[in-house]
Image: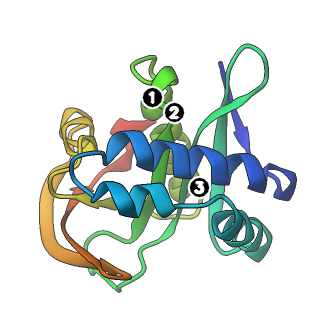
Amino acid sequence: MITRVATPVDAPVIARVHVDTWRTSYRGIVPDDFLAKLSYERPTEKWAEILGDGENFVYVAEDELARIVGFASGGPERNGDPVYRGELLRLYVLESAQRRGLGRRLVGCVATRLRQAGIHSMLVWTMAEGPSRHFYKALGGRPVSVGQWDFGDLTVDEVAYGWTATCALG
């Protein structure tokens, strides 16, 4: 498995991984009808925009057949937090590729890139009841804030996990 910087050509596959991971990771947390209505079209457009904006950065993980099976994106923290200046914006790994160290490797890529930009702290927001909270705790993240995430007719509780020293992440 390798990790590399994503390119605009990767947008459709990143969108597919994004949607497919939502459908497996948030089953039982997010209503089934919401997950069933997710499409690849809108996320493909969004990822094409993100990959072309130069503001954030994205890494992908490829399997032995060079298929993208996960991705992570990061950049400056979006809300002006005085302690956590960097943000892991998204981390998704297909269920079939989980528990192989890809998530840890992708987080390390984001942390390294933030440090190269002079940013040595980072946070990530995740659903309070989502399975990824265990992953972030295992990486040494500490709960630092809570909130709610509204999208469409759905509101979920969320929690931010933070690291004050990203050097331990990669």
Picture coordinates of residue 50 (x, y %)?
A: 69, 70
Q: Element type at marker 3?
A: helix
Left/right of residue 165 with respect to residue 18 in the rendered view: left
Q: Are marks 1 and 2 in contact (CB under 8 Å)?
A: yes
Picture coordinates of residue 69 (x, y %)?
A: 62, 32
Query: In the image shown, does 1 or 95 lie closer to the viewer?
Result: 95
- Where is 78 relative to 63, above or below? below
Q: Nearer the viewer, mark 3 or mark 2?
A: 2
Q: Residue at x 62, y 68 (%)?
A: 56
Picture coordinates of residue 107 (x, y %)?
A: 46, 42
User: Mark 1 or mark 3, which has the lower sequence index?
Assistant: 1
The answer to whether residue 6 shows anywhere in this view is no
Q: Residue at x 30, y 51 (%)?
A: 165
Query: Three-letter amino acid code at disc 1?
Result: Glu
Q: Element type at marker 1?
A: helix
Left/right of residue 8 with respect to residue 108 in the rendered view: right
User: Mark 3 or mark 2, which has the lower sequence index?
Assistant: 2
Which residue of the protein is positioned furthest toward the bottom in this rendering? 80
Which residue of the protein is positioned furthest toward the right in this rendering? 9
Q: Nearer the viewer, mark 1 or mark 3?
A: 1
The answer to whether residue 144 shows anywhere in this view is yes
The quadrant of the picture occupied by the N terminus is: top right
The residue wearing badge 1 is 95
Query: Three-letter amino acid code at disc 3?
Result: Gln
Q: How many marks?
A: 3
Scheme by which the image is coloured: rainbow
Query: In the image shown, does 155 or 117 lie closer to the viewer?
Result: 155
The residue wearing badge 2 is 94
The quarter holding residue 55 reads: bottom right
The residue wearing badge 3 is 116
- Where is 160 relative to 21, above or below? below
**Alpha-carbon distance for marks 3 and 2?**
28 Å
